Image: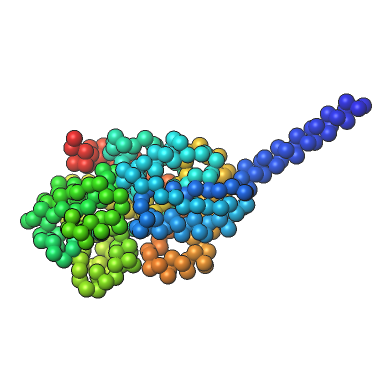
Amino acid sequence: MRLFKCATTATALLALVLQSVLAQSGEEFLKGKTVSLYIGFTPGGSYDYFGRVAARHMSRHIPGEPTIVARSMPGAGSLQAANFLYSQAPKDGTAWGIVSQTLALEEVLGNPAVRYKAAEFSWIGRLTSIVEVYYVWKTSKATSIEDARLYEIPMAGTGPGSPSEGYPLLLNAFANTKFKIISGYTGSTQGMLAMERGEVDGGLTSWNTLRRTKQDWIRNHDVNILVQFVSERYPQLRGVPTLLDMATTPDARRALAFYVSGAEMGRSLLVPPGIPPDRVAVLRAAFDATMKDPEFIAEVERSGQEFQPGSGAQVEQLVKDVSSVPSEIVGRVKTILRPY
């Protein structure tokens, strides 16, 4: 009888432990934990802004309200952070990331710096899609995209895996421009500083970053916007051609549409592969709740940033769509972006 009672007590205790583990796994698995949100670019740009604003607001929508700390991890157009998150970061929900919108494109195009499978990440959601622009200083020979077909225009690049270097290569190939990439800058803010120092004529950034942080440049006509990297013209930039407007043939248009699809990925939040689905579901629910949080929305509105959020399922589908592009289009773009 004594043995029976001991066994019964042990079974009951084991059941309680299992219930506790299961509850923690599905709901409060982050209680008392610190989450690191790795941002693949330096401070100052829209990747950094959205990473930090998410870190400030998401905690209160996660059971257990963990501490979320934004950490900068620039390098190789953010591929350093992507590789880290894929293979080295903890797979328990305590490591998140915001990396280049071309993450899936770089894998499909065979970038040798890629050490990840984009479809194996768990996509939590998109904070916003982005309107990126190519801008030049007022002293540049280029005041319009047409001038860039006549003169060599040096532009800041943030690494082979970044749109800041992919877009000009494609424009040179499909639109007969003469952009010269000056690589090695760690972010769009550093590209702006390089332009002010006279090292380059301009660079790539989001329209909202430019409008929000450099209002005097726009007001005083210190910069000219040459092209916007979207499929349809943004209302505030109706006089500026899109990347697709620059295509000279139907094949060129299809190739450019493939690459500009990264703009739809925008500033998306991901976590490493291997995290249990129930935990991913908790994070997605917290993300969706944050996107509707009045305090979060008010902060974004005060910043003047774009705000076009999307669900984790939507971002996941975008990644799948990139992977299904016809091989001949991928091959042509790859030849242009990886000529060596």
The residue furthest bottom is: 219
Residue at the image point whose x is 32% and y is 62% from the top: 209
Q: Which residue sits at x=18%, y=48%?
A: 181
Image quadrant holding the N terminus, namely: top right
* Residue 6 appears in the picture as rendered: yes
Report the residue that reaches farthest toward the front: 197
Q: Is residue 58 left or right of residue 134?
A: right
Q: Farthest residue toward the right?
A: 1
Where the C terminus falls, by quadrant? top left
Within the image, what quadrant is residue 88 found in?
Answer: top left
The residue depicted at 32 percent of the width and 66 percent of the height is: 213
Residue 311 horizontal/vertical position (percent)? 46, 53
Vertical placement of residue 312 versus 119, above or below: below
Percent position of residue 145, x then y: 14, 59
Side of 268 where 152 appears, left or right: left
- Residue 202 pos. (x, y %): 20, 58
Q: Estimate the x, y position of residue 152 in percent, counting from the top left.
A: 10, 53
- What residue is at 40 percent from the left and 59 percent from the top? 49
Res 290 visible: no
Instruction: State how the image is colored.
Output: rainbow
Instruction: Give the mark count.
Output: 0
| Residue 85 picture quarter | top left
